[in-house]
Structures are given as structure tokens and as C-alpha cells.
Amino acid sequence: MRRSLVFPMETDNSYVELVPQKNLDMEAFTLCMRVATELAKGNREIILFAYRTLYHDELNVWREADGEYSLYLSGDGVLFHLPELNTFQTHLCLTWDSKSGMAAFHVDGKRSVRKVYKPGHKVQKGGKFILGQDPNSFLKDFESKQSFIGEITDVNMWDYVLSDAMIEALHVGKRMPRGNIFDWETIELIVNGNVKVITEEL
Amino acid sequence: MRRSLVFPMETDNSYVELVPQKNLDMEAFTLCMRVATELAKGNREIILFAYRTLYHDELNVWREADGEYSLYLSGDGVLFHLPELNTFQTHLCLTWDSKSGMAAFHVDGKRSVRKVYKPGHKVQKGGKFILGQDPNSFLKDFESKQSFIGEITDVNMWDYVLSDAMIEALHVGKRMPRGNIFDWETIELIVNGNVKVITEEL
Amino acid sequence: MRRSLVFPMETDNSYVELVPQKNLDMEAFTLCMRVATELAKGNREIILFAYRTLYHDELNVWREADGEYSLYLSGDGVLFHLPELNTFQTHLCLTWDSKSGMAAFHVDGKRSVRKVYKPGHKVQKGGKFILGQDPNSFLKDFESKQSFIGEITDVNMWDYVLSDAMIEALHVGKRMPRGNIFDWETIELIVNGNVKVITEEL
């Protein structure tokens, strides 16, 4: 059994807070999720993941209005050109490592080019992780035109970089290694507004 | 061996009535069929399935003129953005559950996003199920510009929601579970007008 | 473990020199590499591989501005129409044989049409092999608008033509036969400018 989050419509108040298992400064991470949306390319930007501390957007993942994907670690972002999201589930992972600055997406198990982004940077602890909205201040000031519509499941996060082979295995359904920041099987979710939590068979 | 229905041309009088095994108020359903058509996107709407009681369109499935797919349960419908039907067979399933209101298409075994549609609604019993035409009144008043042209086979229906894994298995040829509203292997078909019933090897 | 070269940005001074195991006049060759780039089709030409002697471009491989691929053996080139490179790794091989003049690309293990190109020609020894830039004179005069941006790994070269089956096997990960001009596992690389050498698990 697995929980799946359905965001049925555009709103400025529906979101899900993800409660992390540990609260740490991150010098590396792997973030994975399965995403389906019918918001067609070129329409508007879509927030896919937001982690915000009191004064900063610490780690945001976007599908930009022009169809590109982006990662922002407090400040300027880095862009990737990936296949379009669609009504069927796409397995999306994102890795980043402070030491080398290497960032890459993995789409259905295939890695994008690596890009050098903010070597030496650290993601600060003490923030809130949310799906569905982009907080312009701490858990408020949401814009409906940035909200997510569609379905998200299997959100897992690690404080290290998984290998290409491990991510390929996750894509085809392996459930190891379990996320040590978020583990979707046990994660505590705090639902706000119009979000349906479905329990689905696997 | 399996029967396949060929609708060779645009008409306002050719259709096939499907005789159900039981006649019940439906609080959930799964409807599957294999469909091939060369009516290209954008041309016109195409009726894929119609269930009508004396005064109401109870359950209609359309390919809309703009290429979207829709489900109508007496009243406003819900739209899905799916890959285009084409000259090859597409395995199309549609699920809906009154309790949650969750509706989804499955195209060749892959599920679309789920949408919330008419939670608490019930599909009324006592109607007629037809392929090929949209009845604007009870089994008459057909419009040729809405008729289906192409081929339909393997129409099965259940009064419950099949799991993603079961639908994936049906797509690749598994013939279980057998439909409890329609079972294509044993279904009684009442053919009207210019529709060819082909028996094909599997 | 395998080294991977990341060229993060457009420059006119970043390149990697590959030191060959032997220095010979080549009457045939197979050149393979894995390449990922987000430089979209139609933007500009991209140098994929350059081998230059003091006065001549001896063996250059390009992605042309119009999306075609080309091989130049000192003088006019030969063009191939192949699938577009993208953010995921493409396994690209190129074979040429002086006796027949047969040239062909292999993309992810699938061979292109063969083309007849410069039968009787010989590739001269004594040059420099480089990735990332096209030298308009001997290891200088680079143009940033021709530079490579993205990721290259698994560059191997042989002084004979590998069979289609051998190249298909290399594509799926077989590491035999080892390149006798370049063997990526042991090759000496001389890095210049902004190129990151990543060591990745396999």
C-alpha cells in the first residue's frame, strides 16, 4: 500500500507539509518523487518542491513556464532541459553535492547531464518542507498561479547522493535504500486545504 | 477467438446495444475497451460509450473535438488530457468511485492523474448501453457528426474499481477478472445499421 | 568506477587532451564515446572530437548547426542524419575503413546507413587528440561558439572496424575489446581550463 496526494485544482491555500526524520544542514541530497500533471508546457510555472526557512527559499524545485526544470538553493538557480511532465507518472530525482557542486536530474531512471552549481554551499536546517505551493514568506503568501495540480507520491529524500544504479532501481520499484530525511512509507504528512490522500495498492 | 466491431462510415443510425449481465445502481465502475480510429484530433467529437436512461445521459465517454477525453455522469463532465487515439488499437480503461469521487483513465496500462468528480453520485439503473452513437433521447436522435468510425473490441465493465496492476495485466492480454456487468466473451450484442462483427484470432 | 568529463559552460579555453597508446597512420578506426548535452538542435555547431596534426584537421566529428552529424578527414566531410543528442547519455560510435571507404555511425547500438567516404585515404600520425574545442591551428585558436558543453565519458578508439554486434555489446556495457588507441579505463587525460573530472560508480 502507498499513499498518493491528489491536488485537484488551482488554489492558493492547499498544500502538504512533510515532517522530516532529522533536521540537519545538508551538504548533499537526493530528492525523488513520482509526479503526474496535465498542466501543459508553456502555460505557467509549477512548484514541485519547496523547503523554506524563516527568511530564505532554501531548496526549491520548479517546472518553469517555458518547460525547463530548475533547482534553486537560496538565490540564482540552475536550469535543466528534460522531457515534459504529463498525465502519466514520471519518476523524478534530483541530486546535488556541495563538495563538487554537481547537480543532476534523473527522469524515469535516466540521468541528465551534470551541471556545476554552488559548490561549497550548505542547505540550512530549521525550515519547512512543502508540496503544492511556493511560500513567498514562511508558510504563507501563496500564489495560485504557481500551485501544483495533479498527483504526487513516493517522495523520498536522503542527505547523500545515490548512485545512478540505485536511482534506476528505485524507478522500477525497489524500495531500498529508505530515505533518511523522508521515507514515504512512514512519513508524517500535515495536509492543508483541498488535497486528497489516496491509499493505493502496489 | 474474439469478436470485434467495425464501424466503417459516418452514419446516424449504426450502433450496437450491449446487454448487461446485471442491472444495478452503480456506485463505482471500471470500463475497458480496445479502440482504433483514424478520426484525427481536432476534427470533431467522437462518442466512445453511452449509457442512457429514459431522461438522462447517465454515463458518457467522449473524445472531444479539441482532443481531450471526457466522462459525463448526468450533468457537467470531467476532462483528461491523454495521448491521441490512432489507427492502432489503444487499450482504454476508465475508473470512478462514488465514495472518494476519484476518476482516472488508463491508456495502454498506464494510469492518468486522478481527478475528483462527483463524490456521492450514483449511476442509475434501467438504461441502455450503446456503442457507436450518442442518443439525445432514449435510443434515438443520433447525430452523424458524433458517431464513431473505426473498430472497438474487448469491452468489459465491472461495478468496482480495478487496481492499477489488474488493469496493466488486462492491457497485456490477461482475461481476468471477467467483467461482472459486461464480459466480452459472453456478452449479448444487438447490432443496428452498418456495423460489421468480425471474429478474430487472438 | 569510471571517469566522466563535465564541461559546464561555453569557453574558448577549456579542453581535454587524450594521450594515445600508440601513434600510427590509421587506415581504419572505430571511435566510441558516451555524450550528453542540452545544446538544442539548430542552435550552433558543436565539436565532439578533434584530431589535428600541425597543419591539418585530420579527423573531426561535429554536430552541425542544422542537427546533422559529420566526419571530416582533412578536407570535405560526410554528413549523417541521426537522432538528436539530449540531456541523457547517447552512446555514439563512428567507424571508417580506408579500403572500402565505408563510414557509419552507431547510435545506442544501432547502425546508421553506411556511406562511402574517402576510400584509399590515410589518417596521418603525430597529431593531438582533444575533446571540448576545435583547434583552428595546432592546439590553439579556439572558438567558444564551437565548444562542447555537457558531459563526455567512455571514449575508446581502435585502429580497426568493430562489428555491429561488438558495438551493440559495448553500448549495453560490455568492456571488451579494450581500445588499442584509447582505453578509457587507463587513458592519460591532460585537462585545461574549466573541465570537471568526476569519478562515477557503474
Image: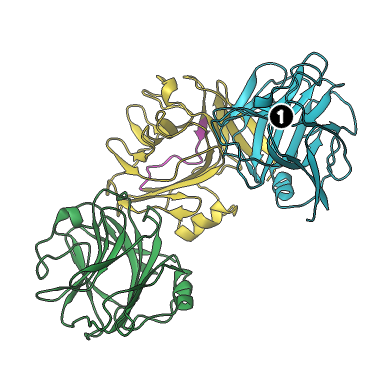
Chain colours: A yellow, B cyan, C green
Measuring from the top left, give residue B28's x and y in whole percent: 77, 29
Q: Taking the image as drawn, is residue A158 in sight?
A: no
Whether residue C123 sits left or right of residue B132 in the image: it is: left
Which chain's residue wears label 1? B
Closer-to-camera residue (A185/C91):
C91
Whether residue A83 sits left or right of residue C26 in the image: it is: right
- Quadrant of residue C117 within the rendered picture: bottom left
Closer-to-camera residue (C102/C185):
C102
Closer-to-camera residue (A166/B181):
B181
Q: Residue furthest top?
A: B55
Q: Is residue A75 above or below residue C192?
A: above
Q: Is residue B98 above or below residue B171?
A: above
SS majority, magenta:
loop
- Quadrant of residue B148 within the rendered picture: top right
Task: Look at the image and say whether residue A19 sits in the magenta stretch.
Answer: yes
- Quadrant of residue C56 within the rendered picture: bottom left
Which image quadrant: the C terminus of chain B? bottom right
Task: Look at the image and say whether residue B42 sits in the magenta stretch.
Answer: no
Measuring from the top left, give residue B61's x and y in whole percent: 69, 28
Identify the amino acid type marked 1: Thr
Residue indicated by mark 1: B11
Closer-to-camera residue (A106/B182):
B182
Where does the magenta region start and end?
Answer: A17-27
Measuring from the top left, give residue A70's x and y in whole percent: 36, 40
Kindly state the secondary structure of the residue where label 1 is placed.
loop
Task: Name the residue at 46% across, 55% down.
Answer: A110
Measuring from the top left, give residue B23's x and y in whole percent: 89, 27
Q: Is residue A91 above or below residue C35?
A: above
Whether residue C197 sits left or right of residue C89 in the image: it is: left
Whether residue C66 sits left or right of residue A163 in the image: it is: left
The number of discs equals 1
